[in-house]
Amino acid sequence: MAKRKLPVGMGGGNMNNMMKQVQKMQQDMAKLQAELEEREVEATAGGGAVKVVATGKKTILSIKIDPEVIDEDDIEMLEDLVVAAVNEAIVKAEDMVNAEMGKITGGMNIPGLM
């Protein structure tokens, strides 16, 4: 039987090189994911009245509330500030993760990475 020739660019050497690059990218991404779990972002709402700290894994570490904004006649306003600050912290964490992952993947959009 005659051997089929691989198209140009599909030879074993190029494929091995590409596999090494993919493996390095996977190692870099695993290392980055571990680092991002430790990194923190901070978001505020109400001019700093509510401050939220979250990790790159979108885990909320702390919520600080300025006592001056606590008004028992307007708890709803305080609740809104907490929600706004938490949502902003999550967005900042996602932005941080996406920016760092983009450095490794060269901006390729690879679904399911994070």
Image (cartoon, rainbow, N blue to C red):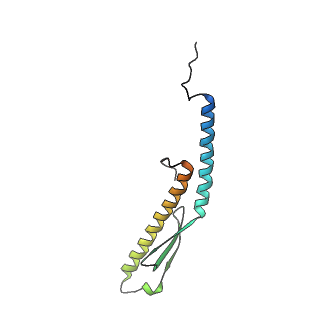
Is 110 drawn above or below residue 92 in the view shown? above
Please tell me which residue lies in front, 105 or 63.
Answer: 105
Indicate the quadrant containing the N terminus: top left, top right, bottom left or bottom right.
Answer: top right
Residue 43 placement (x, y as % from top left)? 48, 71
Residue at point 60% right, 32% down? 14
Residue 107 placement (x, y as % from top left)? 50, 49
Please tell me which residue lies in front, 69 or 95.
Answer: 95
Q: Quadrant of residue 34?
A: bottom right
Residue at point 58% right, 17% down? 3
Q: How many marks?
A: 0
Is 54 drawn above or below residue 30 in the view shown? below
Residue 66 placement (x, y as % from top left)? 48, 83
Residue at point 61% right, 41% down? 21
Residue 94 placement (x, y as % from top left)? 49, 60
Q: Residue furthest top?
A: 1
